[in-house]
Image (cartoon, coloured by chain):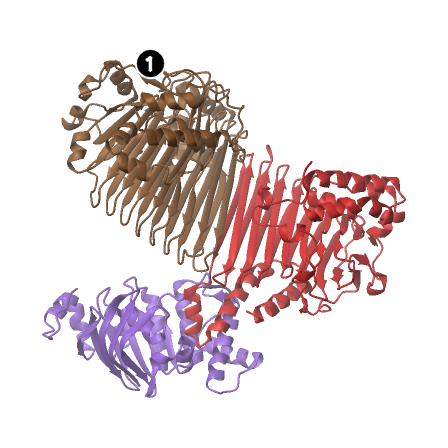
Chain colours: A purple, B brown, C red
Amino acid sequence: MLEIKDLHAEIGGKEILKGITLSIKAGEIHAVMGPNGAGKSTLSYVLAGRAGYNVTKGTVTYKGEDLLALSPDERAAKGIFLAFQYPVEIPGVASATFLKTAYNAQRKYRGEPEVDAMEFLKLIREKTKELDIKDDMLKRAVNVGFSGGEKKRNEVLQMALLEPDFILLDETDSGLDIDALKIAADGVNKLRSPNRAGLVITHYQRLLDYIVPDFVHVLADGKIVKSGDKTLAYELEEKGYTGMTDTAGSAQSVQL
Amino acid sequence: MAISQDTVERVASVSDKYKYGFISDIEADTAPIGLSEDIVRFISAKKEEPEWLLEWRLKAYRHWLTMVEPQWANVHFPEIDFQNIYYYSAPKQKDKLKSLDEVDPELLEVYKKLGIPLKEQEVLAGVEGAYNVAVDAVFDSVSVATTFKARLEKEGVIFCPISEAVRDHPELVKKYMGSVVPYTDNYYAALNSAVFTDGSFCYIPKGVRCPMELSTYFRINAAQTGQFERTLIIAEEGSYVSYLEGCTAPMRDENQLHAAVVELVIMKDAELKYSTVQNWYPGDANGVGGIYNFVTKRAACRGENAKVSWTQVETGSAITWKYPSCILQGDNSVGEFYSIAITNNMQQADTGTKMIHLGKNSSSTIISKGISAGKAQNTYRGLVRMGRKADNSRNHTVCDSLLIGDKCGAHTVPYIENQSRTAKIEHEATTSKVSEEQLFYCQQRGLSEEESMALIVNGFCKEVLQKLPMEFAVEAQKLVSISLEGSVG
Amino acid sequence: MKIMTPLADQYLDRFEADLNTLPGGKREAVRRLRKSGLDIFSGLDFPDRKNEAWRFTNLAGLTKGTDAEATVTEEATSIPRDALKTPHVMTFINGRFSASDSRLGDLPEGVSLTSLHAELETGNDDLVKQIKPKSGALVALNTAFMEDGFVLQVAEGVTLDAPVLIDFVSTNEKGRDARHMRNIVLLGAGATLTLLEQHTSRHGHRYFSNPRTDVTLAEGARLNHYKLQDESLAAFHLAELDCEITKGAVYENFSLSLGGKLSRNELTTRIVGAGGLSILNGAYLMRGEQHSDTTTLTRHLVPENDSRQVYKGVLDDSAYGVFQGKIHIAEDAQKVSGDQLSRALLLSDRATVAVKPELEIFADDVKCSHGASSGELDEDALFYLQSRGIDALTARKMLIDAFLTDVINEISNEAVREYFSDIATRWLDKV
């Protein structure tokens, strides 16, 4: 579903990703782990298309199409969903308005008919009920004044509503809130299916107790230095990144 | 409820506590009173200056004659009679000094009383309380001593009276003097350019980190005398220097004028920290006497990544009119302004800064704490301007005022101009008082009312006090307390 | 002798002749009033940028005199003028009351709405005495040349629910290129009223509008005063308002400014009674070469009262926005709180905003704050919206709309809130 080949990217002239190759098939969840500063966040932003992250070399193919040629909203409409570690607060924009605009924008892009307010309300009510989210959250401005847990729930609600094909879960920061984490993980697990795929980016093995990945990759200094199955995560937890990359035995030398 | 009458009265009694109000009997060499082209020539001749400098002074003087005193500041005072001021007064000196040991013992005594170390030995011998600071001592119109010159010379650092720099390093003075503050800049800057008598000159060569703090200590002693000093500091590419200045004057019934100009030039990757503790005589509780402190201070960040930081603690002077500014020309250059201004009794302060952003990614921070007590008026006045090309530049300003008593005033007048879409400016200002609850809470824990006040005010100022070099911070903290009362110590 | 600007000279030259033809020309009291206004004006001229209060706004384009070339042909007003449904409408066309375009029949007892023209001609002397030339150049000029305006008087305890709409309409009528409207609002104790003032144009022509409004609120009265300024893009609109707020009275003002080549909205509120409340809010939306200036002065003259204000600006193209706001707290005016916020969004590299928020405080037991910020849209928020499938332009509009909604929501009258919100959205559609 997603093919990353020799991806190089820079921010403000500084190269952060130095040649990443990764292949994710439908039905698979991959985890990318790595120490701080390895380029984990950059990877998620490059895939989602954030401005300021320049790809200098390499390709990313998504469902057979050149992903890098698309704007962030086009990527979203084609099914890519980035769950933010710190969802952005947008004062003045009601959650309901935001969700409806996003939902209809994606439908319109895909040539599907837009839904009217009544229909949307019905749909969103179903989702909030399913996720045990209070309706009043829809009236409040996007993420403004939300607790950490509420922000995560809002991300999951968006995920459930937009039903993406490819989920990017960015939990790079070391300051993890375990409860919030579980909420995000549950959301991802609910959507897991043979038609969907996901990339979980994290610093700690802990998250992978909740979302069990099919493959684990270690990212260091902008490159993937080791790949394996989920046991690699436990190994990392035990030995730490330094130990791991030292024994990686790969031809690439790693600077941590 | 407002604070008790008792506190107001105690706070009002400060002026009696001005520690530096003594007059020293030092024989002086003085110019005739008043101002004319002849006086300008007299000063220039006294200092044995080259022709170009005299010409520059005369141009400044002639320009000054065409100007009018600025009226826009929120300060009020009787018209100054510029013909009733001595423009030059210097302690009599028989011969040129060969070493610090030859400085008039009486002068040394003055500085000892002020707590200023002019003895290198003490510092070198590690005498307790002696700071690792090089000092240029300016007494009325001239520099009387400069310490640690030899040690600084080893690093290529030039630190000397500006009159000496004119003689020994004319190329540097000629190149930079007036380049940041031209004599046409404003009324007092023009006056200063015509009659400046001394001040400090610092030059930090490329790549040098100045090994010690540099400082100038200004003292006005003679009666009816104005002090017009000029400071010029040049930090070459990649250099670093921290500079401090302190000021005091005797208690006199008359108002004395202090009109200084300070120019800072900061090149690529260089950093300059400039700290001031201004404690000129503020006048008595009825507003009689005190210094008029009308000062022009400006820094030009001329290269990429140049950084300048102004920190000021303004507790003295009857009137303060002063806006240390930063011209951020270089891309990524940084300007900072941290200020505490305390006015008590009849004092008036109109102070602040200007941050002119010209380069890309330049950033500035302004933190101003104004404290007003007695019948004083305290005004923050500042300008933040983002030029059309100042892409992605940032400013953050916080202006807090504290009022003690119900007869004083606190004013905030910021000017904010943004011409760059990608630049961001944020400004916040608050005005509050020391609450009865805060005072009561401290008192309930065993502090006296004035100790409580000092504690609360120091807490209010903390962010700025922390920016001072350590040697100065302790002194400044004490001064903050003393200025509001004899409350601590 | 002082050299006056060409426009000032024109006014001075024609005054003697106009004195007889302007309303009240046969009444000595009115003539005297006009003369005192002219005296003040002739000593001042129009303000220039050397005047501290005008440092960001340059009137040279107006004061150099009429410039026929400047006429713009584009239709200026695109908002639906009838969107606000109310039975009470008073219409002025080119500065003159038009009875045929007004609906004043349904006003309840205790509410009197008359034209200043009529009051100056035949009204009682008490009202004329209320009009003062004041010290500013613009109000003095207005006093000398005032021709019409609305006089709204509400008796004690009367409450009117439906908004009163005052519709100032400009058309391209020959020889009618200036309007000096003088408006008076007097609310009796406990009276409550909602007023919407609307300044629009049917043609994109050049004219000079110099309205002056004086409001007096008796004890416990409340006025919700809204203003829509959508003048022609070639017009100069220099408005002044003064409001006296007595004990327990509430003055709420919201100004939405979109029109004018150059416009200034100068508001002064004076709180002279405990429990008084001054609420000044507004939004300015400018594009092209437009210049907008909002200048406020809030004076707390007695203890125990509050004020608050929020202004937001959106500046596109080469537009220039000014906000100057001063909070003054007099000596002994203890237990006062005053808050002010001004925010501006710059949508273009050529736009400029100049802000001067001022605090002038002479009492210690007060709480005052002001905040000002300016910059572009939040990039994190833009990316977040886009990452959910919303295209860049829609995302931008959503964020600008949210920025404005925040302040428009402060309007307490629902009908006006929706009306203004709709107008702002229409403006946004052109971004």
- Image position, residue B289 (x, y; %): 46, 19
Q: Quadrant of the N terminus of chain B?
A: top right
Residue B446 sits above or below residue B107 on the image = below
- Image position, residue B190 (x, y; %): 44, 32
Which is more toward the observer, A123 or B203?
A: B203
Query: Mark 1 = which residue?
Result: B28
Mark 1 burial class by Cα count in 10 Å: few <14, some 14-19, many 20+: some
Residue B386 sits above or below residue C162 on the image = above
- Image position, residue B85 (x, y; %): 44, 19
Which residue lies most toward the front here? Answer: B51
* Residue under the point 76% across and 44% down: C12
Q: Quadrant of the C terminus of chain B?
A: top left
Corner quadrant of residue A28: bottom left
Q: Is residue C218 left or right of residue B338?
A: right
- Image position, residue C282 (x, y; %): 61, 56
* Residue under the point 31% across and 13% down: B26
Q: Is residue B466 visible?
A: no
- Chain letter of mark 1 equals B
* Residue under the point 72% across and 66% down: C202
Q: Is residue C228 left or right of residue A119?
A: right
Q: Is residue C184 visible?
A: yes
Which is more toward the observer, A45 or C337?
A: A45
Residue C201 sits above or below residue C304 on the image = below
- The amino acid beneath tag 1 is Ala
Q: Secondary structure at mark 1?
A: strand
* Residue under the point 48% across and 87% down: A111
Which is more toward the observer, C169 or C275?
A: C169
